[in-house]
Amino acid sequence: MLNKVYEMITNAIIESLESNIVPWKKPWSGESAHSNLVTKRAYTSINALLLNVAATKQGYKSNYWVTFKQAQSLSGNVIKGSKSAIVTYSDRLYVDESTGNRIPTKKIKEMNKQKLKMKIITNEIKVIFYLKYYRVFNLDCIEGIDNSKIPKKTDIPTSENEKINACDEIINMMQNPPDIKHCKQNAYYMPSDDYIALPKITEFTSSQSYYATLFHELVHSTGHENRLSRKLDNKRYGAGKISYSKEELVAEIGSNFLCSDANISCEQLNTSTKAYIKSWIKVLNDDAKFIVIAAAQAQKAANYIRNITPD
């Protein structure tokens, strides 16, 4: 039962990829990430991907979501026939290693109050983390909410092949950044020398395409041993290997998290994305937890670049 949510998530992502819908490509431009209308908190990591899948599949235009009860609290109603999406969260259970029996959370809290935390440290008690979920509805599925309670859409005007301040601000936040060299006709990150090479912004089809590519390579660079240490190979992290497909997945997702933070569009696929889809489907079929792990690593990379510590 603990793996049920992982299987639900993985099946949704695989179904999306098989339909040539890339889950981390947001289905709108000029708006921030998927957020809860009531709490104003942005959905991150795997939840951002799941809501992208739902929004793309159903054609939603809004990036705001509410639970059934939240809609009611705003005097709104869910339109009949509307489909919900799942949002996950982490929970834990405690198991006595000697008996295999589950220990109630209440008892663990009492033990902690009595300063008996050493029982967990010495592995007499095993902590098992797992995912749970609840359902949310896109704002497009809700009627009756006062428009004054809905934030207005904001578009970020950009000129082709010119700098975008919001993107540069994100890049400048990164501590211990790699060198960025505008000297090549293709884009890549070289772990052995810790630098990014890519064409100049004027050689891209658009400014947004340039920054999406640069964000992709910056996420790769967070895997360096002096940053988040994702064990990249010394050359170009093993092209053709499964590990390469996995790292590309982390970079693709992380790039789109950063594009979302900067409110720019990422509609144009990386030129190699379609070639990776088959390998990603294989990886996900082999490991039901990997998409959750990859999304978490991508979020961690995006946070590193933005120099923020999550709540």
Image: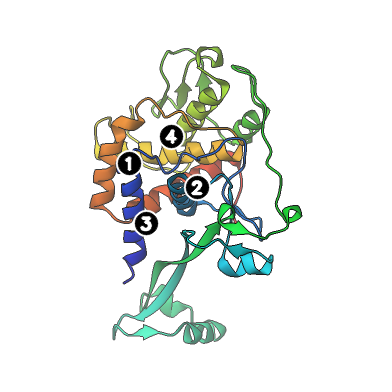
Q: Which residue is mark 2?
A: 300
Q: Closer to the camera: disc 3 or disc 2?
A: 3
Sequence order check: which comes first, mark 4 or mark 1? 1
Sequence order check: which comes first, mark 1 or mark 2? 1
Gap in angstroms between the C-alphas marked 4 and 1: 27 Å
Q: Which residue is mark 3?
A: 9
Q: Which residue is mark 4?
A: 220
Q: Closer to the camera: disc 3 or disc 1?
A: 1
Q: Is residue 120 above or below residue 308?
A: below
Q: Is 169 placed left or right of 29 in the picture? A: right
Q: Do labels 3 and 4 touch, CB within 8 Å?
A: no
Gap in angstroms between the C-alphas marked 3 and 1: 16 Å
Sequence order check: which comes first, mark 3 or mark 2? 3
Residue 193: mark: none
Q: Name the residue: 47% across, 40% down.
A: 254
- Looking at the figure, which quarter contains the C terminus? bottom right
> Tag 2, which secondary structure?
helix
